[in-house]
Image (tube, rainbow, N blue to C red):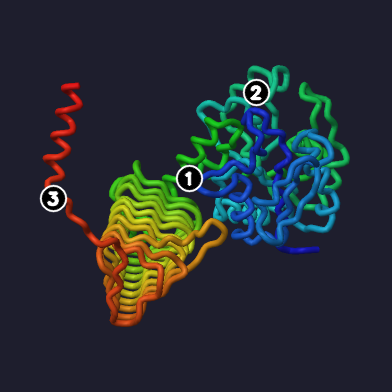
Amino acid sequence: MNEAPTALIMAAGEGTRMKSSLPKVLHEVCGRPLLAWPIAAAREAGAGRVCVIVPRDQDLSEALAEGTEVIVQPEPDGTGGAVRAAADVVRESSTVLVLSGDHPLISAEIIGELVTTHRESGAAATVMTTEMEDPASYGRIIRDPSGDIERIVEAKAPGDATPEELAIREVNAGTYAFDAEALGEALSGLTNANAQGEYYLGDVLPLLRERGLRIAAYQAPDPGVNLGVNDRADLARASEVARRRILTSHMKAGVTIDDPTATWIDADVRIDPDATILPGTSLRGSTTIGGGSAIGPMTTLIDSRVGAGATVVHSYLVGCEVADEAAVGPFTYLRPDARIGEGAKAGSFVEIKNSEIGRGAKVPHLSYIGDAEVGEGSNLGASTITANYDGRSKNRTKIGKNVHTGVDTTFVAPVEVGDDAYTGAGSVITEDVPPGALGIARAEQENVEGYAAKKAKESSEAEDS
């Protein structure tokens, strides 16, 4: 027997109210699939095994952390049917936690308190409850005179509960802790004699009481534990609560967020103290921000790393790195594998992808740098372009240290520019430029005298005719 609790996470619901081709538990809340939230909470709370109960016709693997076990529920026959499908795992455990895969707001702290309450009470089962102003279709908690839980009455369909039972505001949060041996025996006694024709997990509680076993309650201080997701409106509500908690956590950790109502930060984003996040900013995926950096306004970072003391203004970054003290923006697009070196600059209307901009180098404005290496201290003039695609393959441009390019320079890759070199404005560089040289490649200028008068005469004659 494993003394650490085993977590069973129910994720086999059909989710028809989402009206989506994507399984319900794969819809995201703050950058994480719904299902990933209770998995992460259970692991953080110390669960020894985490098992997800899935339907037979859905692949939920993208939401499963390494080491998560999968149990298939053969038929969609209710929460009791889900746990019955995990009977073998129950027999191999000492304490079993049952969580819902569509409840993203449950925390490791709450799960830990539930387990502690369960063990200290000596109960066969401990039910997490909460009170709601409008309980809607949530299962109602029926207590005995001593305050222990007698049973849970489902309220999903007419006939499941009486009017008196529907008036109860204390509801089942869908999270339980069980003595595994007692649960295993009770599962065999479940029936589906109800309006839905399903096996309800809550129905094991009267069976346990019939054997003289105690059913304890743990009333969660956070009503959000009961915020399940059944449709897109529920998804939006859960996202709003999760986002507010994420923002509060960062602010309490020393991050300045100017306007939390206009800032979106995913669950896996990491921000060091003294960073400032300005309005209209969205930080997504595995983004990290160093201390003292200022991000925004109106900036999106996806799976990107920004060092300490950097600034990113009015820009869009995906899968890139910005080193300490670097400056990005405004209106900059950094694509995957763009690396902006320490103290370097990627300025206004600049696009960079799969390129390294060296320490202190500058790409100030109106440029496209793709598949390139730009050396330390170089300065690329406005409208510098690396022509990296020849129609069949991508080629690299190598620009050395302390290079200065004139405005409107195009480098036709593959090409290399040596240290301390220059290029003339308007040049199309197709051959290597040696270190310290000036590369010029443009047509010789020709001035046509009297051209304006000639054009005016031609226009006048055309009008007369």
Q: Which mark is residue 168?
A: none
SS class, disc 1:
helix
**Which image quarter: residue 154?**
top right
- In this rendering, position of residue 137 left or right of residue 381: right
> Which residue matches tag 2?
165
Give the CA separation, mark 1 to mark 2. 31 Å
Residue 292 visible in image: no
The percent position of residue 275, horizontal first and vertical second, equals 32, 61
The percent position of residue 449, horizontal first and vertical second, equals 13, 50
Q: Looking at the picture, which amino acid does disc 3 mark?
A: Glu
Q: Looking at the picture, which amino acid does disc 1 mark?
A: Ala
Q: On the rendered image, what quadrant is the N terminus found in?
A: bottom right
Q: Which mark is residue 449?
A: 3
Disc 1 versus disc 2: nearer the observer: 1
The residue sitting at 29% across, 82% down in the picture is 436
**Vertical side of 372 occupied by 87: above or below:** above
Disc 1 versus disc 3: nearer the observer: 3
- In this rendering, position of residue 73 left or right of residue 293: right
The percent position of residue 443, horizontal first and vertical second, equals 29, 61
* Mark toward the start of the polypeptide (1 vs 2): 2
